Amino acid sequence: MEQLLQQLVNGVSLGSIYALIALGYTMVYGIINLINFAHGDIYMIGAYVGFALTTFLGLGFFPSLLISMVVCSILGMAIEKVAYKPIRNSTRIAALITAISVSLFLQYTMMYFVKPDTRTFPEVLANKKLTFLGGSIILDMKNIYIVLITILLMVGLQYIVHKTKIGKAMRAVSLDKEAAELMGINVDKVISYTFAMGSALAGAAGVLVGVYYNTINPLMGAGPGLKAFVAAVLGGIGIIPGAVFGGFFLGMTETMVSAYGGSIFKDAVAFTILIIVLLVKPNGLLGKTIKEKV
């Protein structure tokens, strides 16, 4: 029982990171129906920005986190303007190939500048541990920080989407882009804001994963990026609560499989669950069936 509770604690921390990355996927898809496969590499760049700020400039955790979010949001907007905007009205396969190309470009550009070596992320948070049930459950302070920061960012995103003018515009564009344009909404600006917010969350996740695992490398975005996409689809891509649910579900599933079935099978189990869910509910666990007008 104690091991089960310990793995649930670890799963919540890992799920928080997946949820932050998945939110970027689901926001972009909800607005322009694009699967941004470069999103995982933006998360990787966020980790490197946090590493540079803490290692070479000596900044603390929270300033590094905020600056990484700003840098990644600017990068996300630049990618949208340069790579995605020119092919916005092209076929889906063209958009998919472009996204994969941008992903590879970011990976190998970073590899050229920072080399493929694995770097050790500095200890920027107090490594204090709390014990429960006579020491059978260990709760690292890093886990608490990760979960609390994730919750704050998710609450902030929900506030922006539901209570602000740009959030209302985002929901309008998501519902009907052409009608939103006719109502005077600047769709280009809305899409840029969407990429900025999603990329900022990915940058935050990059710093958090550096703190969590203490290692980073230029290819670190491929695996978690793909898993976060799985989490978004699992919960219902295009739906913010679905991305959050999918992230936590996937994180807890991975830790449970690693603890009881062997870590070598965790990815296979995650994708098997995705296939089963899509066979039963093609729109995801929290997705709704939408009828198209002909």
Image: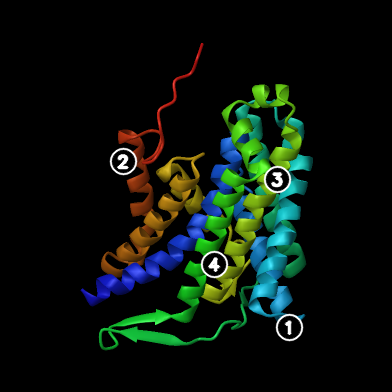
Q: Quadrant of the N terminus?
A: bottom left
> What is the secondary structure assignment of the residue under circle 2?
helix
| Picture disc at residue 276 | 2
Total marks placed: 4
Amino acid type of disc 4? Ile
Between marks 4 and 1, how big is the CA–CA gap?
Answer: 21 Å
| Badge nearest the viewer, 2 or 1 | 1
Residue picked out by circle 3: 193
The residue at 33%/47% (across/down) is: 273
Q: If you read the primary sequence from the N terminus, does the residue marked by circle 4 or circle 1 appear first?
A: 1
Residue at image point 36% right, 61% down: 252
Measured in 3D between alpha carbons, the distance from the residue under mark 1 to the one under mark 3, in whole angstroms, is 30 Å
Q: Which residue is mark 1?
A: 58
Q: Secondary structure at mark 3?
A: helix
Residue 96 visible in the displayed image:
no
**Which residue is most to the left?**
1
Position of residue 95 measured from the top left corner of the image (x, y, whole percent): 65, 34
* 2 vs 4, front mark: 4
Residue 135 percent location from the top left of the image: 29, 87
Three-letter code for the amino acid on which mark 1 is drawn: Gly
Q: Quadrant of residue 180?
A: top right
Q: Give the residue type at disc 2.
A: Ile
Q: Are marks 2 and 1 in contact (CB under 8 Å)?
A: no
Mark 1 or 3, nearer chain start = 1
